[in-house]
Each structure stands twice: as structure tokens, then as C-alpha cells.
Image (cartoon, grey):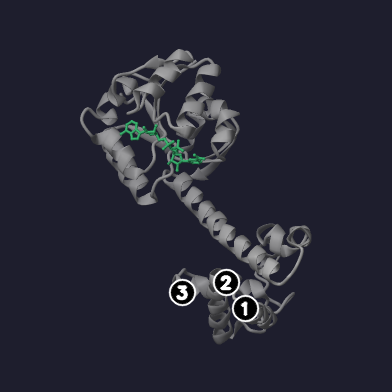
Amino acid sequence: MASIGFIGLGRMGHAMSRQLIGAGHEVTVYDLNPAAVENIAAAGGHAAGSAATAAAARDFVVTMLPNGPDVEEVLFGAPGVAAAMTTDTLYIDMSTIAPEVTDRIAARLAGLGLAMVDAPVGGTSEFAERGELLILAGGAEADVTRAMPVFDAVGRETIYCGETGSGTRTKIVNNFMSTALNVLTAETLAFAEAAGLDVQRTVKVLSGTTAGKGFLTGAYARKIFAGDISPEFGLGLAAKDLTLALTYAAGLNVPLGVGAAASQVYQMSKAEGFGGSDWSALLETLRRRAALPGQSFV
Ligand code: NAD
């Protein structure tokens, strides 16, 4: 069993440290909130008076803090966790923070001879309570393998995302899609209601179409990544359908901001000559705007 310093006992951290204790690890905890520390001490953990004390001479140090500045403060403030760890300690940051901050921290720790894995999580505090988080791990493969006893205690699945910083980047990209889809979903249901539809029935219909099921496991795997933009559904026809929806919704006074932004991308793509291509060719228009090298479909 491992000795673990765990810093940050909020909604996620308190549940995760309990899972680690339940798995038989020796867990020493710290949080700015003394009540949170006492809580975990009462559940079989050890209370530390500072983050540095929690981190001293441990096999693993885990941080689960709100944001990048909190993680940097805990690591490099005084007395800092970085100075308390030894080169035998593996540092694991499970907070969701900016990729640039993860890179900066990893470089600074590497300069001290300290290894780091960035491992933000998917799933809410309810998942944390059940030890069923999804862990997106970035770092040297050997370090991620070494961290598995920690990940196995708090998660249902660990996905190796690549070198240090890849876990954080994967999490940010995933959350971009889910947070934007959340707005698109709300726009769609408000539109359905304003159009006089039974919204529950609409949800049932949309759950079985590409709208609800998504593109990633269907069109993208089959078309773009195979280098095929021959039209299964033409981009020009998709643009026409979107315009029909936006025009109708405008008459019903339903604001469809994500839909309007999407319409701009369709116009750009048509102007680039993709009107007769498959509607998945929008990806190529955005890749060009981002100046990504090569073509997605060659
Ligand atoms: P939270 O605000 O509930 O907890 C953060 C804890 O960190 C608090 O207990 C706070 O006292 C402590 N803290 C802050 N600064 C500190 C410092 N300098 N030293 C010691 N302790 C300090 O946040 P949370 O919901 O547990 O989320 C933690 C991280 O996990 C965030 O990055 C969040 O984005 C991410 N996350 C949260 C969820 C969720 O459902 N709550 C899901 C996935 C990822």
C-alpha cells in the first residue's frame, strides 16, 4: 500500500481521499478548511497542518484544487509542496486547469528532478463518491503506470492521453464539446417548444437521429478520417436546412446564437467551394482557419 499526500478536500477531493483510504492506502490530507481535514482524519486519514507537511516523504502527492493559480501556490508558495517532495515522490495533479499552467508546472518540477502526471477527471462528485471517475492521464507512460494504484482507487477507467499536459488538453477539448452542446441542446428544445411541439416526443425522436447520437462514431469515422468528402449529405443542402430553421425560429422570437454561429461556418465552407461536398467537410474549413498543416481528408 502506498503513502499518499492529498491536498484539496472539496466536493471531489473529500470523496477521492475517502476512496484511497478505503483501498488501504496511508493518506495524509490538507485543505485550507480545517473542518474538511478533520472530516477525513475521522474517516481514517491523517491530518496535516500544511500542504508541505502532507507532501513530505510520500510515494504520491495528489492535488485536487479549484484552478491553476491554486495549484501553483500550493506547489511553489511558502512552504511549498515542491520543496517537500523527494525525487521518489510522484506528483499527480487531478484538478482541471489551463494547459499552459500544467506545462509551466511540469517544467519547473522537472528542473527539480520531480516527475508529474496530469490527470484531470471526468464525472461529477457523485461519481467520485462511488470511486467511478474517468481519469485522463498525461505523462511518461512509466509514471502513469506507477500512478495506477491511485487511479484504480478513485476511478472506473484510466485513459492514457500522451505526454505530460495531454490529460489536461483532452479534458479541455472534451469539456468544450460538452459545454457548447449543452447550449445547442437548450436552443433546440426551446425552439421545439416555441414551434408548438410536444418536447418529450421531440427528445425521443432526436435521441435516435444524428442530432442526438452525434457525429463522432458515425460520419467522422466513416468519411473524414477515410479521406472521403463525396456527399452522403451535401453541405449546401445542410446549409439550406439550417437557414430554414433559423428563419422559422426568428419568426417565433427564439434566439439561436449557436445556430447562427454555425450558419457562418457553413457560408465560409460554401465560399471555399465545399458546397457540393459532404457536410462533414466543414472540418476542413476550420482546419484551414487554424492553419493546420496538410488536409484532413487526403
Ligand atoms: P471545490 O471548490 O469543492 O474544492 C476545492 C477545495 O480546495 C476546497 O476545499 C478548498 O478549501 C481547497 N483549496 C483551495 N485552495 C487551497 C490551498 N491553497 N490549499 C489547500 N486547499 C485549498 O472544488 P471541486 O468541485 O472539488 O473541484 C476540484 C477540481 O476538480 C476543480 O479543478 C474542478 O474543475 C474539477 N472537477 C470538478 C468536478 C465536480 O463535479 N465538482 C468534476 C470534474 C472535475
In which quadrant is the C terminus drawn?
A: bottom right
Q: Secondary structure at mark 2?
A: loop
- Considering only order in the chain, which callout, 3 or 1, is on the residue closer to the N terminus? 1
Residues at marks 1 and 2 touching, judged by CB atoms closer than 8 Å: yes
Ligand 1 within 8 Å of disc 3? The answer is no
Residue 82 place in picture, x, y as percent: 28, 30
How many badges with numbers are in the image? 3
Mark drawn on residue 108: none
Q: Nearer the viewer, residue 96 or 199?
A: 199
Ligand 1 within 8 Å of disc 2? The answer is no
Q: Nearer the viewer, residue 148 or 49?
A: 49
Residue 62 place in picture, x, y as percent: 41, 29
Q: Amino acid at mark 3?
A: Arg
* 290 relative to 217 in the view: left or right: left
Q: Amino acid at mark 2?
A: Leu
**Residue 241 visible (yes or no):** yes
- The residues tagged by marks 1 and 3 sit, at their Cα atoms, a distance apart of 25 Å
**Residue 137 visible (yes or no):** no
User: Label 1: which residue?
Assistant: 246
Q: Amino acid at mark 1?
A: Leu
- Considering only order in the chain, which callout, 2 or 1, is on the residue closer to the N terminus? 1
Q: Secondary structure at mark 1?
A: helix
* Res 70 → quadrant: top left
Residue 58 place in picture, x, y as percent: 37, 20
- Considering only order in the chain, which callout, 2 or 3, is on the residue closer to the N terminus? 2
User: Label 2: which residue?
Assistant: 256
Label 2: how many Cα within 10 Å (few below 14, some 14–19, many 20+): many
User: Label 3: which residue?
Assistant: 289
- The residues tagged by marks 1 and 2 sit, at their Cα atoms, a distance apart of 7 Å
- The residues tagged by marks 3 and 2 sit, at their Cα atoms, a distance apart of 24 Å
